[in-house]
Amino acid sequence: MLRAAVRTPAEAAHPDRVYSVVENPNAIVPIEEVSTSWRRCLGELGVDPSSHDAPRILTTQELREIRAPVEELVASAQEELGRLHGIVGKVGYAVLLTSSGGVVVAYRGDPSRAVQFKHWGIWMGAIWAEHVEGTNGIGTCIAEQRPVTVHRTQHFRTRHTSLSCCGAPVFGPDGKLAAVLDVTSIDPDVSDRSHALALVVTIDSARAIEESLFRRHFRREWSLVIAPPSIIGRVSMLAVDDDQRIVGADCNARSMLGLDDSLLATGVSLWTIFNRSPLLFRRRNADAMAQLIRIGDNQPWRALITPPETRAATTNEALLHARSRIGHLDHILHEAPDSQLREVALGGRLRVDEFVKAHQAGAAAALSPRERYILELIGGGQSNKEIARLLGIAPETVKSHVKNLFVKLSVERRAQAVYRAQSLGMMATA
């Protein structure tokens, strides 16, 4: 059922709260991006916080024109959209991929709730730019160009104060914003905790889409996933030609290595950044792990090197070539024993396919049957208390099992555990 149009006292008071925050520079709002966005929406964009107008949804023809330039992006995202919805859809979220202008170009949601989602604008062709809808997970993510969560009354427009959304930017191979990946719940009672978990997996999925898009764009070049020795989570990507000149760098690599379009246009060599080791690029038949030593620094950078796609590649081979590796390899890049990389420090290569298979088998075997079952229940959205009641054990015992499986999967949060297990083939994506 759709919510009645009658305004609650909280909704009636919402515009006054917005004006109060905007007019008072010292007003306290839990998230800085929200107060900044509210001021921007009212002062610069002229959005009405009391508006109850329905979101605008483009016609089929208008959407076709918007979507045409981003078809490669949409194609690159398909697998990850399904994986993400397999996680967050269980607790009522819809998944949206938008253009850089905030128009929804891909959608995943429960078909039985389609009428509700469309009512709220959680639909193909809906426009969620800030100048149209005010503060929201998509529009504010575009404005800030960083992950954003907007929970219920943090929205600018009164109509949206029962929604909860998380937006994560997707940067293209040129380092510029290409899209926003968003998950939105229309359930006004979604918990703060569930919403925080939704943001974690949305960010992971946005990164996976970025990687797939990068690999597709530079499929005729060598792709390098590089992990610095001390910045966990700042995995970056480079594209290198046969002469080891850097021809592409993702947003993280540009920031970390000081690369930009003008420098890339000069044909800068990989060996102006790392110690020369050209033997790394001799073999062309499989992903390989390696070590790179940055000039002036003896700390090894872990790297995953993917050879160029062959021109005779089949459609399935092309899809495999473009598939994201970061989601299940970032922890390996940081944690693989140095003994396994000894030969690559001297310019050799280590095949990764067998290593990943061994890691997958090891991670699966490390979990006890009870831990695996608890992981499945976590994936189904069960809380520790609910799991304890189901298994007839104390909540503290469940907490201990969860802590152990976190350690074994090298994660810190429940949503990350589910995502990691699915990436390793230990759980179905549903």
Image: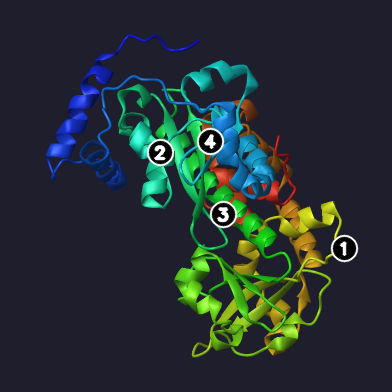
Residue 256 or residue 68, whichever sits in front:
68
Numbered label attached to residue 312 = 1
Q: Mark 4 is on which residue type? A: Val
Q: Which numbered disc, 2 or 3, marks the residue closer to the eye?
A: 2
Disc with the residue nearer the chain's start (4 vs 2):
4
Residue 391 or residue 327, whichever sits in front:
327
Q: Secondary structure at mark 2?
A: loop
Disc with the residue nearer the chain's start (4 vs 1):
4
Q: Which numbered disc, 4 or 3, marks the residue closer to the eye?
A: 4
In the image, is 405 to the left or to the right of 317? left
Q: Quadrant of the C terminus?
A: top right
Numbered label attached to residue 104 = 4
Numbered label attached to residue 373 = none
Q: Secondary structure at mark 4?
A: strand
Q: Mark 2 is on which residue type? A: Ala
Report if the CB atoms under discs 4 and 3 are less than 8 Å apart: no
Judging by the rendered image, the residue that carries numbered circle 3 is 207
Q: CA distance from mark 4 to mark 2?
A: 10 Å
Q: Is residue 62 above or below residue 349?
A: above
In the image, is 27 to the left or to the right of 388? left
Q: CA distance from mark 3 to mark 1?
A: 28 Å
Q: Which numbered disc, 3 or 1, marks the residue closer to the eye?
A: 1
Q: Mark 3 is on which residue type? A: Arg
Residue 48: quarter of image: top left
Q: Residue 351 at x, y = what percent?
A: 79, 72
Residue 327 or residue 121, whichever sits in front:
121
Q: Secondary structure at mark 1?
A: loop
Report if the CB atoms under discs 2 and 1 are less than 8 Å apart: no
Disc 4 crowd, CA 10 A, few/some/many (<14, 14-19, 20+):
many
Residue at horizontal 70%, vertical 39%?
429
Numbered label attached to residue 129 = 2
